[in-house]
Structures are given as C-alpha cells and as structure tokens.
Image: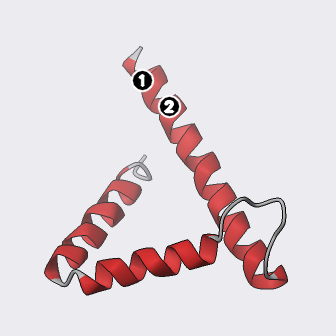
Amino acid sequence: MLDKIKSLLASLTDVALTFLLLGIVLQVVFGAVPFFPADVVGNLVALIGSLGDAGVVGLIAIGVIYWLSSRGNKK
C-alpha cells in the first residue's frame, strides 16, 4: 500500500515538473502564454532571488530542495 502511494506521488511529481518545464520553455519562446495561468519565469526568478537574499538559510534551503528532488531518482 505504501509503495503504491510512493509510486503515485512520484508520478504526480514527474507530471508537475514536466508542466513546469513546459511553461518555462513556452514563456521564454513566446512571451506571455495565454493558457498558462501564471508567470512561471517571474515566479522562478522571485523564488531564486528570495533564497539568495536569505544568505546561509537560502543555501540550506537550496540544498534541501536539491536533496529531495534527487532522492527519488536513485533506482
């Protein structure tokens, strides 16, 4: 049961990352994308800026995010 939940969450994460990357590419190529509800690139730049302004805490947060995202790729 727990394996099924993990598999489902991994699949949902993969789909979400795919849509995020699609949104970034479309926004870079075409500018404002009418069917994408948010400013993906702007939000990503703001997130990176806020993590950079946080100093050491931002570096730790980036490390934790990287660790969490790369943890599921080990097979």
Question: Which residue is farthest left?
Answer: 56
Q: Secondary structure at mark 2?
A: helix
> Which residue reaches farthest top?
1
Separation of marks 2 and 1 at Cα, in angstroms: 6 Å
Residue type (three-letter) at the residue carrying disc 1:
Asp
Does the residue at mark 2 contact the one at mark 1 (Cβ under 8 Å)? yes
Q: Is residue 28 left or right of residue 48?
A: right
Dot label at residue 53: none
The residue that label 2 is drawn on is: 7
Which residue is more in the foreground, 4 or 39?
39
Percent across and percent down for residue 64 are 26, 62
Q: Few, some or many C-alpha atoms within 10 Å of disc 1 (few <14, some 14-19, many ≥20)? A: few
Quick check: 75 left or right of 19? left
* Residue in the image at 35% along x and 65% along y: 66
Q: Is residue 13 left or right of residue 22?
A: left
**In the image, is residue 6 above or below residue 1?**
below
Q: Quadrant of residue 67?
A: bottom left
Q: Tell which of 37 and 57 is nearer to you.
A: 37
Question: In the picture shown, does residue 66 fall above or below 49?
Answer: above
Residue to which mark 1 is pinned = 3
Give percent across and percent down for residue 44. Answer: 51, 74
Picture coordinates of residue 63, whole percent (x, y): 26, 69
Label 2 CA crowd tier, 10 Å (few <14, some 14–19, many 20+): few
Quadrant showing the N terminus? top left
Q: Residue at x 42, y 23 (%)?
A: 3
Residue 48 place in picture, x, y as percent: 41, 79
- The residue that appears at 81% across and 70% down in the rendered structure is 33
Residue at disc 1, secondary structure: helix
Q: What amino acid type is highlighted by mark number 2?
A: Ser
Coloring applied to the structure? secondary structure
Residue 24 to residue 64: above or below: below
